[in-house]
Amino acid sequence: MKHNMAPAGRCVVVIALSLLYLSRAIFSTEYFSTLTFFNSELHKHGCGSPSEWEEYATECESSILQLEDPECEEGSNPPCESVFSLNAEKILSQAKLFIEQKRFPFAVENYNTNEELAIGYVLIGNGLYDEAIKHFSLLLQVDQDLVSAIYGRAIAYGKKSLQDIKNADLALFELSRVISLEANRPEVYEQRAEILSPLGRISEALSDLSKAIQLQPSARLYRHRGTLLFISEDYSSAMEDFQQSLDLKKNQPIAMLYKGLTFFHRGMLMEAIETFKEALRLKSDFIDAYKSLGQAYRELGDFEAAMESFQKALMLNQNHIQSLQLRGMMLYHHGSLQDAIGNFKRCLQLEPYNEVCQYMKGLSHVAMGHFYEGIKAQTKVMLNDPLLGQKASSEYLKVKYLREYSRYLHSHLDIPVAEYNVDQDLPGNFKNHWAKNLPFLIEDYEEQPGLQPHIKDVLPQNFESYNAEVQKLICTADHLGALMQYNTPGFLPNRRIHRAMGLATLEVMQAMHRTWSNSKVRVNGKTRPMQWRDMFDIAVKWRRIADPDQPVLWLDQMPARSLSRGFNNHINLIRGQIINIRYLAYFENILNFIKDRILVYHRAYNPRGLLEIRQALENVNKVEDLLPIMKQFNSKTRDGFTVNSKVPSLKDPGKEYDGFTVTITGDRVGNMLFSVETQTTEERTQQYQFEIESIYKDLTGKGKALVLSTELGDVDAVCNLILSLVYYFCNLMPLSRGSSVVAYSVVMGALMASGKEVTGKVPKGKLVDFEAMTTPSPDSFTKMATHWMNLKRLPSWYQGLPSVAETFPTTRTILEETAGPEMTEGSNEADDALIDALTSLNAMGRILLQNGKQEAAGSNTDFVTNKITTLFGLMTCGARFYNSISVKKHSEAEDLWKKSFHYAKVREQVDELLQLEKEWDAFLENIDTELKTTDQQLIESQTSQNLSADTPFIDARSGENVTLGKYFGKGEKLLLVLIRHFG
């Protein structure tokens, strides 16, 4: 309430800051009409829910449709009734108002005619489209060229086009008639573009918008055209239009958001992040900007910053489905499966038919070994058959493969992994279709056995349930796995993958050491000497179980028919204007490689033109500039060209194998496709396998000499052979997924078996597989890799670690250990709840502080008078915090977090809270000082012992003048909050 007496003391805001008030403030939420315009297309491009178009909608809707009764006040009692009932008097009154305010287009000189036209537009505004069409048609019977009537009928047909596409054709016909009569009216071209775009006729819509801009540029038109360009994936032109719109009208959060999305889709993540932040400066509670900011940070691999952004979006709207979905997916790919499931469950409570959340929930359950819940969720996705003519979602295409693989894993839960082979057990056509992500149309396919009741789900093991030696094994695996993390945009740290591949590294080390000690290994139910593929199969096993969503399969085990045609590992580096940020650091290397190959070609086939083309290539700094040059100097180059790399043989010096193929083409709109692929044919595979077998044979001999000989073996020679073997493995690309991490874990494990420990991380921007593919020889790759690995002598305690294969012999034991990497600290549900509660409190407290500072920047008095509700939000945060951890007082909360203070996450969040309190105190002290209402100044004021029932107040919500007595005698407990500084 507003109070008409001297300001109260500072206690109210101090108590709010200290989180001791439990009163709940009511936040008003604005709901805007949604804009169906482009919604489905925009959603495919990562855009948010229709609510984010709130500002777009209010501007895009024609002013003639913004109808209100001038005599009705919002919130009045009785409430306003529609002025657009079929009350002829009110319709006529509104029509006259339209005429006075000139709120309909193409008015004529005759007042009576204008009145009739205005009535038609009032009918449109009331949703009476058929009546409007009849009304305009009557007018056109009198004057067939009455432009306003033609235009009004076009609008009415356009409004009905969502019901029947024939109405869209009629609307377009009418709008074209208007243009033939009035060719210089921009609003007509814009209206026609709004009809054309949902029909997929984007180029025509763009042409109309360009004409409208030519006639009369406006912020709205540039934003409208930018949106269509964005949908067309012409992100560069879209960005220019959004910027033009912002130049004409700066305060447009939506335009700023979409400008940021154009950067995001082009791989310009830092620019996108800064633009999303600018959108938040324009609109501090912009949920979709926080969501987009979170996604940009996620692509950068910054998990903490992404979580903070998603958290802020959900603090503003805890039911924001896209934020829940994106946060859940990020948590899954971070290895936090239980947290991910919580997000997907909440998503499905709000939107039960959300295929993405349903699929990811099923996947997360299976990854944890919860097969019953997982397959139940997968079946729900399978039941969402696409409608006739509707394109199936990627989740629908993948879910049948996931369900079959889940059933296979469940039936093999308790069988030792050394006794079976996934590549041999799964049907060939199933593997081929799964790896290529084809629709599940497999002839004569026999389904995997259903869930068997006697095989129970997996129960994750608490870290502390393992003995000290196994705990040490797991912690060592976590350390080794973290060394494999790529420091490159697009690669999110995944604790589950780290642990799994760390254990793979240790198992490779132990298996290689046994082999070099003349021991045999157990593989596919047989005991025999270890082969090179067995070494990689160890890593493949762990990679498969770590993420069951991806088919990690040996390509040479595919059906012969598929292999004879060639199986391509294809990577788009640039498609149109979309840049694959994962490989951005390699663009210059590949460009130089292409230039070299072009010169080699012309040296052999066009020696006379060599000098000219060399000079032309010297001026090429971007891949995009190569295609015009190739067309200029080679008549065979039409729409594109390919360049092949060669890999030298160690086994047969002078011999070369096919490496990767670079393809550069121009598409139908002049954009470019720049891609790299390796083709796994039977002949090429055999060539590489002979090379790898030769190196492995040499490695085994030198490894045995190193382990068994009393003399010092040649460690450097062993290291070189290990890296050379992996060089050929990466160039072969023999797996459908995961070749890079599998290769690197084998490198680390084999090096450890030779007595060398990898202590260095992969350098920023480097990818192991691409380093091998773009390095001209195994020697060059070896020198480069050993430099960053920073090899040290292996500590002796590694030899005393438990056997990985014996500690985790089955899929069940592997899942028990990898289902929850967060278990390492031994945290429990109460600790997790406390961490979540503190994180939410800090995030919202920070948002409210930022809002308060922005509001106070103009005028402290204005902040206190009009914006004091910021503090009510802080009280609500405090109440939610207390309720979520089941305490009632600040001291109880302190006691709770002191018990969990040995957890790093708890310490971090408590430190953040204490810092936040200091910042709030400093902010409020500044407000007091500016207003000369500090505690020292107020202590001299006379204190009232009681308040009379006649004490006057102003109700802060309604603005009504009231007395205190109004609230007495109602049989309710009264909490009186006196807000100071309103005198």
Image (cartoon, helix red, strand yellow):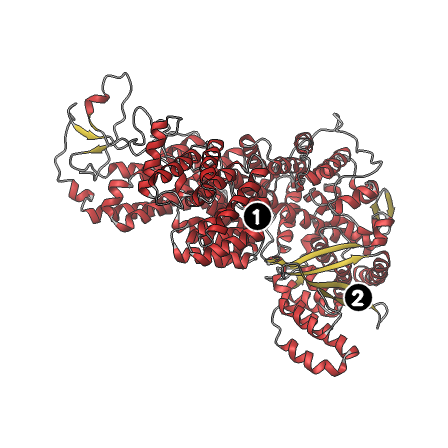
Q: Which percent across, then down, holds residue 924? A: 27, 45
- At label 2, the amino acid type is Glu
Residue 354 showing in the rendered view: yes
Judge whether 135 appears above or below 850 on screen: above
Which quarter of the rendered picture does the N terminus lie within?
top left
Q: CA distance from mark 1 to mark 2?
A: 63 Å
Out of 756 and 608, give the one closest to the viewer: 608
- At label 1, the amino acid type is His
Out of 144 and 175, give the one closest to the viewer: 144
- Residue, disc 1: 45
Dividing the picture into quadrants, the one containing residue 363 is: top right
Secondary structure beneath dot 1 equals loop
Which quarter of the rendered picture does the C terminus lie within?
top left
Q: Which percent across, then down, holds residue 309? A: 48, 46
Dividing the picture into quadrants, the one containing residue 449 is: top right
Judge whether 137 appears above or below 532 on screen: above
Out of 566 and 907, give the one closest to the viewer: 566
